[in-house]
């Protein structure tokens, strides 16, 4: 199976999106299709052995719309020139039609005020009442400004379907042609004792208001994808390469893997790479969401589009083009924005029968009022009102616009949400399972305690650190790396070692500065008959705290004791407390021994600990928690976490972890900061709350608006909804839904930081 994203043109409402979905799904070889009305995109899964993109595009064309594929290699190019010209042309055409319609509608409205109010208004020229003048003025609005409604209605009829444009064309045409008949044959009405009233202003004003609403809607929808444009705009345009000892500036597209790139203070890093020379601090906030600049030195990775702050450095390009972190982020956000949340299913079902149902209600309304009242004018106006006020667009936009803004906001905060389903499910989480190593902790051992028998007098501690680190530099053991890093942090110079030997499961030894240095376990010290009583209480204290105790002996005597632990991340405790305040159960999952695990749990405030769990048991452990009836999120970073991430209802991967863990997850935290989990859950809750508000408004609008337009209040209050008001309400219902979704752009996590 292959996946493709198509850009769509010609959609006017959610019913159009449904038509395109049906057309694409009818193509043999298409497995699934999701059309996002808000994003104007279709995501298609298809079998390349049975069909191809051209066949899918042809199906869309046959349905009366247009589609073209979005290429992955152009992820960072933004909108192509053709698409940009199309959008600009569409906007200019709408503006011209709204302007003409607005001027004519104003004149018609003034001329119709005496009839609408039943008052004699002498300040209005009588020639404005002339139906022939109103006919001449209305005709270009009806058939030029409203041309697209007729075209789209015809396309829908050929497919035996009906859309929003069908309702608009029917409603405005009813008002226009009724008025035309009254203008051409006024005697027909007079013979029946009726006034040959005309409603040209209704047709013109309704068309103008709907076009104005679409203009506003298009602009608002453009803002929902602002996150994508902002991400694309982050990238540098050029790079300064070092070639043959010279500096040359080239477009970013010409940077190749292996090129050495120079970055000066204040400049954007053009592509991903590894620092070769120089040190600096880099602002990675635009990618990770972290506001604190990160120190970079030789061997460290740098991310394209981040900003160099203080020093100059050179780095070797390791990922370019569509393989950069930024390009992958853009692709994930695009995929998420094009996905469909389960909560949208009800709206989709309603949209499928909405337009035919409204047409049926309109016909029923006409028949009822004409038979009861015998008043064709009353019957016509209520029928037009029903056709005009109905709005499936609001239903179609309710979910995708919120999802687009929500996923985009997540990307701004360094949270990549792979799909709308993950975003929706995250708000239902009851239990969060945190892997210990690399998630709660830093994921690498660190020397936390360096205790000596003789204290620090005369530089004794520094000398011992030098001896220990010099010896451990020759070992590949993770604990040895921790000792070396500790010496580097203390700026201790290391010396040469002779006769180095590693004793498996015990420790290491060698000659350093003419002294026999031995580092290892207590069991090994006892085998060597080296007494450890001097620091035995400290050893027991370290082990109680969950740290590994490592002995240091010099020339056969104990001189020091090191406590080595996987240090807890600075924000882990704060994040766990914040999660608990959200009403979530937090569980630690680890393969470490229970004593160490419980020590870490106490420190960060976790009450439920699942320790000594083998990697192959992690998925089963998550499944057992799910069996308790809980929606479970699993957070991890390693290869052995991937099955558990896939098993969980929501898998959350630490972005600093392995690719396989990230691939198995639903949400990725780029920075690896657990506070991002708090932000992700709060964002999910805010997004779902926003979607529910939109759906409530859309449903209530139609449930209440259609009966009112049909005249349900007339028998009680003698009041009818003017079709002009119905048109204004319909036009701005979609705008209000999109505007409400845009409020998510102001989202800020509460209580996660500070």
Image (spheres, rainbow, N blue to C red):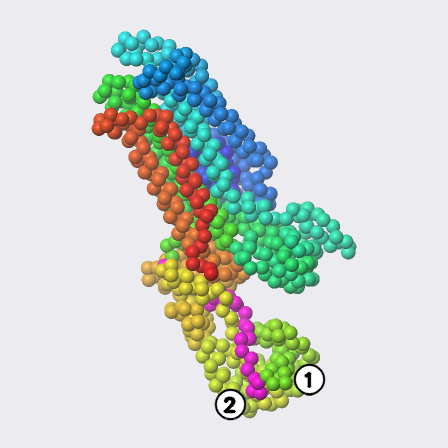
- Name the outermost residue toward the front: 123
Residue position for label 1: 513
Task: Note whether 142 is above or below 302 in the view shown.
Answer: above
Residue at 51% of width from left, 74% of height from top?
Answer: 565
Task: Note whether 630 is above or below 743 in the view shown.
Answer: below
Badge 1, how many Cα within 10 Å: few under 14, some, many 20+? some
Q: Is residue 245 left or right of residue 642?
A: right
x%, y% of residue 136?
Answer: 44, 14
**276 and 658: which one is in front?**
276
Q: Is residue 610 magenta?
A: no
User: Mark 1 vs mark 2: which is more N-terminal?
Assistant: 1
For residue 157, the mark is none
Residue position for label 2: 533
Q: How many marks?
A: 2
For the question of whether residue 610 can be seen, the reply is: no
> Marks 1 and 2, how far apart in space?
26 Å
For the question of whether residue 733 can be seen, the reply is: yes
x%, y% of residue 385?
Answer: 33, 26
Residue at 46% of width from left, 22% of height from top?
Answer: 103
**477 and 670: which one is in front?**
670
x%, y% of residue 165?
Answer: 41, 28
Q: Is residue 251 left or right of residue 746?
A: right
**29 and 465: which one is in front?**
465
What's the magenta region?
A: 430-455
Looking at the rendering, which quadrant does residue 21 occupy?
top left
Q: Secondary structure at mark 1?
A: loop
Residue at 57% of width from left, 56% of height from top?
Answer: 284
x%, y% of residue 655?
Answer: 52, 58
Residue at 73% of width from left, 54% of height from top?
Answer: 242
Q: Is residue 240 left or right of residue 92?
A: right
Q: Is residue 467 left or right of residue 400?
A: right
Q: Name the magenta segment's main secondary structure.
A: strand
């Amino acid at each position: 199976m292959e996946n493709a994203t198509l850009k769509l043109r010609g959609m006017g409402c959610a019913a159009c999106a449904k038509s395109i979905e049906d057309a694409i799904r009818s193509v043999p070889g298409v497995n699934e299709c999701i059309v996002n009305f808000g994003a104007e995109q279709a995501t298609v899964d298809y079998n390349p052995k049975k069909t191809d993109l051209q066949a899918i595009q042809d199906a869309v064309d046959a349905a009366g719309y247009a589609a073209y594929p979005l290429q992955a290699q152009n992820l960072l190019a933004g909108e192509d020139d053709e698409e940009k010209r199309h959008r600009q042309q569409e906007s200019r055409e709408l503006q011209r039609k709204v302007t003409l319609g607005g001027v004519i509608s104003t004149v018609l409205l003034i001329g119709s005020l005496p009839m609408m109010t039943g008052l004699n208004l002498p300040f209005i020229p009588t020639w404005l009442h002339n139906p022939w003048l109103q006919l001449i003025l209305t005709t270009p609005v009806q058939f030029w400004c409203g041309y697209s409604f007729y075209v789209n209605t015809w396309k829908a009829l050929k497919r035996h379907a009906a859309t929003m444009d069908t309702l608009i064309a029917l409603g405005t045409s009813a008002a226009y042609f009724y008025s035309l008949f009254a203008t051409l044959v006024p005697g027909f009405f007079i013979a029946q004792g009726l006034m040959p009233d005309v409603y040209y202003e209704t047709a013109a004003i309704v068309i103008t208001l709907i076009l104005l609403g679409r203009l506003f809607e298009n602009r608002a929808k453009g803002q929902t994808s602002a996150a994508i444009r902002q991400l694309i705009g982050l990238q540098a345009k050029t790079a300064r390469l070092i070639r043959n000892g010279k500096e040359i500036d080239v477009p970013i597209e010409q940077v190749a893997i292996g090129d050495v790139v120079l970055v000066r203070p204040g400049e954007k890093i053009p592509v991903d790479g590894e620092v070769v020379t120089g040190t600096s601090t880099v602002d990675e906030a635009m990618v990770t969401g972290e506001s604190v600049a990160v120190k970079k030195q030789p061997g460290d990775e740098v991310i394209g589009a981040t900003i160099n702050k203080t020093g100059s450095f050179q780095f070797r390009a390791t990922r370019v083009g569509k393989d950069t972190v930024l390009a992958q982020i853009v692709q994930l956000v695009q995929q998420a924005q094009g996905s469909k949340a389960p909560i949208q299913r009800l709206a989709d079902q309603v949209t499928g029968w909405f337009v035919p149902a409204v047409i049926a209600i309109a016909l029923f309304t006409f028949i009822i009022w004409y038979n009861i009242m015998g008043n064709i004018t009353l019957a016509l106006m209520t029928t037009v009102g029903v056709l005009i006020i109905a709005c499936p667009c609001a239903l179609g936009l309710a979910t995708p616009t919120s999802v687009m803004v929500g996923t985009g906001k997540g990307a701004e905060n360094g949270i990549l949400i792979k799909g709308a389903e993950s975003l929706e499910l995250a708000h239902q989480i009851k239990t969060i399972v945190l892997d210990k190593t690399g998630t709660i902790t830093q994921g690498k051992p660190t020397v936390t305690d360096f205790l000596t028998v003789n204290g620090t007098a005369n530089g004794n501690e520094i000398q011992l650190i030098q001896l220990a680190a010099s010896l451990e530099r020759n070992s590949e053991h993770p604990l040895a790396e921790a000792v070396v890093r500790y010496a580097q942090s203390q700026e201790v110079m290391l010396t040469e070692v002779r006769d180095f030997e590693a004793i498996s499961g015990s420790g290491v030894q060698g000659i350093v500065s003419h002294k026999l240095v031995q580092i290892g376990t207590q069991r090994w010290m006892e085998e060597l008959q080296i007494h450890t009583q001097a620091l035995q209480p400290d050893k027991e204290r370290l082990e109680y705290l969950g740290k590994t105790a490592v002995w240091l002996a010099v020339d056969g005597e104990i001189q020091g004791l090191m406590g080595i632990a996987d240090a807890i991340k600075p924000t882990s405790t704060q994040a766990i407390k914040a999660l608990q305040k959200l009403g979530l159960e937090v569980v630690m999952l680890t393969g470490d021994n229970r004593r160490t695990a419980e020590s870490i749990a106490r420190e960060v405030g976790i009450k439920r600990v699942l320790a000594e769990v083998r990697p192959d048991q992690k998925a089963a452990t998550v499944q057992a928690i799910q069996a308790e009836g809980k929606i479970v999120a699993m957070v991890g970073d390693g290869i052995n976490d991937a099955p558990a991430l896939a098993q969980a209802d929501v898998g959350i991967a630490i972005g600093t972890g392995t690719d396989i863990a990230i691939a198995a997850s639903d949400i990725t935290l780029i920075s690896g900061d657990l506070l991002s989990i708090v932000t992700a859950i709060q964002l999910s809750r805010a997004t779902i709350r926003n979607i529910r508000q939109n759906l409530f408004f859309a449903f209530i609008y139609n449930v209440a608006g259609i009966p009112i337009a049909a005249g349900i209040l007339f028998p009680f209050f003698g009041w009818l909804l003017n079709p002009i008001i119905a048109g204004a309400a319909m036009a701005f219902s979609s705008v209000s839904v999109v505007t409400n979704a845009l409020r998510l752009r102001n989202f800020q996590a509460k209580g996660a930081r500070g």
